[in-house]
Image (spheres, rainbow, N blue to C red):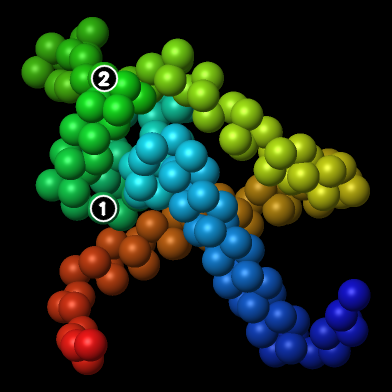
């Protein structure tokens, strides 16, 4: 275990590094899970959004920081793979919502169960008040991250060296 941070600056730096580490591992896990399901990681992340309830393309774009054009491609791929389907909104028939297919989602359970168990084990060590604080932080961090992703996608691409 690492030495406790002595100053706020040290603590902030350690937390920033820990967030990068967790995020990086999350990306690697998402890629591995997506491969097992025959998806790419972006499509899998979008499937995760609609797994909690149907969403419009605009809502998916807002939740992920992707453009609505990119989301259209994601929805097309999820439909072709049998993980989602488009359906007209029950209240406003002009709106189209994307719904995850329960049968297809059943395939994701065994892949995500070991990570869910590992997370539950780690979280079991915290009090209810600490869990509420962690949830508040993660919710705020997610909102901030989506904004940063959207802003980054608007920036021009840098040109790397050709090989």
Residue 26 rendering spot, x and y as whole percentages: 56, 56
The reply to whether residue 58 is in sight is no
Mark carried by residue 148: none
In the rendered view, tell whether residue 12 sits above or below residue 141: below
In the rendered view, tell whether residue 8 sits above or below residue 72: below
Q: Going by the image, does 152 lie left or right of 127?
A: left
Residue visible at 59% across and 27% down in the picture: 109
Question: Which of the pair 116/53 is nearer the observer?
Answer: 116
Disc 2 element: strand
Q: Hey, which residue is sitting farthest front in the picture?
A: 163
Which residue bears the numbered disc 2?
Answer: 85
Residue visible at 43% across and 20% down in the picture: 104
Question: Foreground mark, 1 or 2?
Answer: 2
Residue 74 sits in quarter: top left
Q: Going by the image, does 3 lie left or right of 47?
A: right
Task: Give the crowd class for mark 2: few <14, some 14-19, many >=20 residues within 10 Å.
Answer: some
**Is the C-beta separation of discs 1 and 2 under 8 Å?**
no
The quadrant of the rendering that contains the C terminus is: bottom left
In the rendered view, tell whether residue 60 sits above or below residue 41: above
Label 1 – label 2 distance at C-alpha: 19 Å
Residue 44 rendering spot, x and y as whole percentages: 41, 41
Lower position in the chain sequence, tag 1 or tag 2 = 1
In the rendered view, tell whether residue 47 sits above or below residue 67: above
Disc 1 element: loop
The reply to whether residue 33 is in sight is yes
Residue 20 sits in quarter: bottom right
Which residue bears the numbered disc 1?
Answer: 66
Q: Going by the image, does 22 lie left or right of 106?
A: right
Residue visible at 18% across and 13% down in the picture: 88
Task: Give the crowd class for mark 1: few <14, some 14-19, many >=20 residues within 10 Å.
Answer: many
Q: Going by the image, does 1 lie left or right of 10?
A: right
């Amino acid at each position: 275990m690492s030495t406790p941070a002595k100053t706020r600056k040290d603590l902030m730096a350690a937390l920033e590094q820990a967030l990068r580490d967790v995020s990086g591992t999350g990306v690697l896990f998402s890629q591995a899970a997506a491969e097992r399901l025959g998806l790419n990681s972006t499509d899998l992340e979008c499937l995760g959004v609609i797994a909690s309830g149907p969403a419009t393309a605009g809502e998916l774009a807002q939740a992920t920081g992707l453009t609505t054009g990119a989301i259209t491609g994601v929805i097309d791929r999820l439909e072709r793979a049998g993980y989602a389907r488009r359906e007209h909104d029950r209240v406003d028939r002009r709106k189209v919502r994307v719904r995850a297919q329960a049968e297809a989602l059943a395939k994701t359970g065994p892949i995500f169960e070991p990570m869910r168990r590992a997370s539950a084990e780690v979280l079991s060590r915290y009090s209810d008040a600490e869990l509420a604080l962690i949830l508040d932080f993660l919710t705020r961090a997610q909102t901030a991250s989506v904004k940063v992703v959207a802003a980054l996608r608007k920036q021009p691409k840098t040109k790397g060296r050709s090989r």
